[in-house]
Amino acid sequence: MLNSRLRKQSPWFGALVALALGVIAACGVLVYARTQVTSMRYELGRRVSHEHALSLEVERLRVEAAALAAPERIEPRALELGLIYPAPNQVLTLSDNHLAALHDVAAGEPR
């Protein structure tokens, strides 16, 4: 009975209820959006930390690769494996003409 009496007295009752429901829905959407933004910020922070850790590891691996490729390290290891320097008569020096011919052959153009 109270509702029917209010409806008769106020023609704006339906509009006020709709407005209240709209405000409640809008607040819910805002809360959801804020929650998502906060969640994304935490995720971004985690990913930035992970990227930094990966950058440090890449740098460490570059240093390690440079150390492993250093001639000072390779020469003793090669000698341990029984590798020796070639004799002077085993070394061939190619002139520019020979290099051009090799390039042409590699490209599929016989000379």
Image (tube, rainbow, N blue to C red):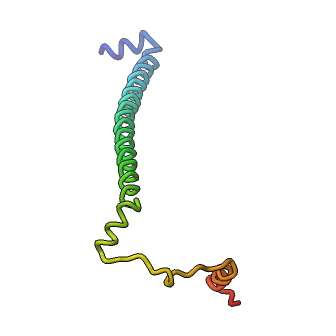
The residue lying toward the viewer, choosing from 76 and 103, is 76
Q: Residue furthest front?
A: 88
What residue is rendered at 67% in x and 84% in y? Answer: 101
Image quadrant occupied by the N terminus: top left
Q: Is residue 26 above or below residue 10?
A: below
Question: Toward which corner of the image does residue 33 lie, by quadrant?
Answer: top left
Image quadrant occupied by the C terminus: bottom right
What residue is rendered at 31% in x and 68% in y? Answer: 77
**Is residue 85 shown left or right of residue 76?**
right
Q: Could you tell me residue 88's position as x and y percent?
A: 49, 80
Question: Toward which corner of the image does residue 51 lie, by quadrant?
Answer: top left
Q: Residue furthest top?
A: 9
The residue lying toward the viewer, choosing from 61 and 25, is 61
Q: Could you tell me residue 23's position as x and y percent?
A: 42, 21
Q: Could you tell me residue 52's position as x and y percent?
A: 38, 41
The residue lying toward the viewer, choosing from 97 and 31, is 97
What residue is rendered at 31% in x and 77% in y? Answer: 82
**Is residue 16 shown left or right of residue 79?**
right
Q: Is residue 37 above or below residue 13?
A: below
Question: Toward which corner of the image does residue 105 lie, by quadrant?
Answer: bottom right
What residue is rendered at 49% in x and 84% in y? Answer: 90
Disc tally is 0
Q: Could you tell me residue 91's position as x and y percent?
A: 52, 80
